[in-house]
Image (cartoon, rainbow, N blue to C red):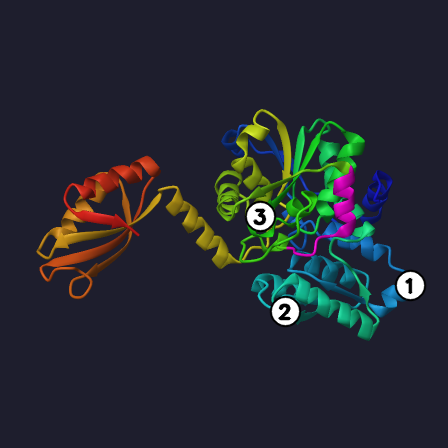
Amino acid sequence: MVTFDDVQAAATRIKGAVLRSPFLRSDGISRITGAEVYIKYDHLQATGAFKERGAANRIALLTPDERKAGVVAMSAGNHAQAVARHAALVGIKATIVMPRHTPATKVTRTASWGANVVLHGETLAEAAAEAHRLEQEEGLFFLHPYDDPGVIAGQGTMALEMFEDQPDLDVIVAATGGGGLLAGTAVVARHLRPNCEVLGVEVENYAAFAQALAGESIHVGGPTIAEGIAVRDIGQLPLAMLKALNVPILVVSEHAVERGIATFVENAKQVTEGAGATGLAALLSFPERFKGKKVGISICGGNIDPRILANTLMRCLLRDGRVLRLVLEMPDRPGMLAEVATRIGALGGNILEVAHHRLFSSPHVQDAQLEIMIEARDANHGAAIEASLAEVFTLRRL
């Protein structure tokens, strides 16, 4: 088992190589959740994620022979960048195996640190198999992203810093993929503040730890915006530690993670990837569990593809009723478009897009169909605009 002394030693070992990130109260997030929320801004690390902590500590522990041979790692992105960076800092050769569909931004950034990037397989499990093959064939040291005591101790330094800044935390919520961050966090919390509750959070399609801790067989898979924690083969050492320390897991939906990303952008002015938003997603999904408590969460990663970020924000605006997508059936005669624009403008709505179909889309030859996207202040404002249009036109939502 990893001990508190291991985490303290890791903190000393990586000092100066890893940023001691801010841990600050967020008024905006606190008001939304009803809890006193402190955010650990670990996406400010050089590679944009907390994974630098574990990678820096484990690389510092390599023997001379292991350094000479070089390292190989498998990762969906953040561990890859962390290993690539810290291997480069000490002059060690690094090979990183990533699933083929890893977001392009993570592949590019990993290669930019000088690592040899190999894209292989559809899943982390398939990438791991290739990494182990390279380990055997080329004599490389396999640097596991989470099932390694040195990595777990390094990840635990985040919680150590959180307690140094706020010793009286009631709850810490940690993103849970392979379990390294959560296990390290639990070790620190049990030592420094035993009555502080430590919770892991997983996304629905990849709730492997929740299943394992419940004694169920693991069934995971499918798309997720939280690809950084989309893990099938969880760490056996973290699993043993979480069982021993009795750490529960919360499971959140894809929509909750998307909402967490959008909430960070709007209310904390921070950009986070899906995995980095899962702590906030848990607070938004289970508000009564955290209400009135002093809660620590982290933005553990900020490496999100710009297109995915843009799509996520637009999806959340649609769900919140701040963007409307409507189809209007109207008579094909002069003045109808002006009537639509006048009614929307009179209520302070903003037309974003219009598509006017006169020939083939309408059910009747004397009718026209209008597809329109409208920006509203909030859901009530959007409902008022929709009601005004419904007084004159037949409409439906897209």
Q: Secondary structure at mark 2?
A: loop
Q: CA distance from mark 1 to mark 2?
A: 32 Å
The residue drawn where x is 86% and y is 64% is 67
Q: Which residues are magenta?
A: 231-244
In the image: residue 17, left or right of residue 261: right
Picture coordinates of residue 166, whole percent (x, y): 70, 30
Q: Secondary structure at mark 1?
A: helix
Q: Which mark is residue 286?
A: none
Mark closer to the chain start, 1 or 2 = 1
Q: Residue furthest front?
A: 216
Q: CA distance from mark 1 to mark 3?
A: 40 Å
Q: Disc count in the image?
A: 3
Q: Are marks 3 and 2 in contact (CB under 8 Å)?
A: no
Residue type indicated by callout 1: Pro
Q: Are marks 1 and 2 in contact (CB under 8 Å)?
A: no
Q: Residue furthest bottom?
A: 137
How packed mark 3 is, by other alpha carbons closer than 10 Å (few <14, some 14-19, many 20 or more), is many
Q: Which mark is residue 203?
A: 3
Residue with the mark numbered 1: 64
Establish if 193 lies above or below 332. above
Q: Is residue 115 visible?
A: no
Q: Main secondary structure of the magenta part?
A: helix
Q: Nearer the viewer, residue 348 or 199?
A: 199
Magenta stretch encompasses residue 135: no
Picture coordinates of residue 347, whole percent (x, y): 23, 38
Of labels 1 and 3, the one closer to you: 3
Residue type indicated by callout 3: Val
How packed mark 2 is, by other alpha carbons closer than 10 Å (few <14, some 14-19, many 20 or more), is some
Q: Nearer the viewer, residue 338 or 234?
A: 234
Residue with the mark numbered 2: 121
Mark closer to the chain start, 3 or 2 = 2
Q: Are marks 1 and 3 in contact (CB under 8 Å)?
A: no
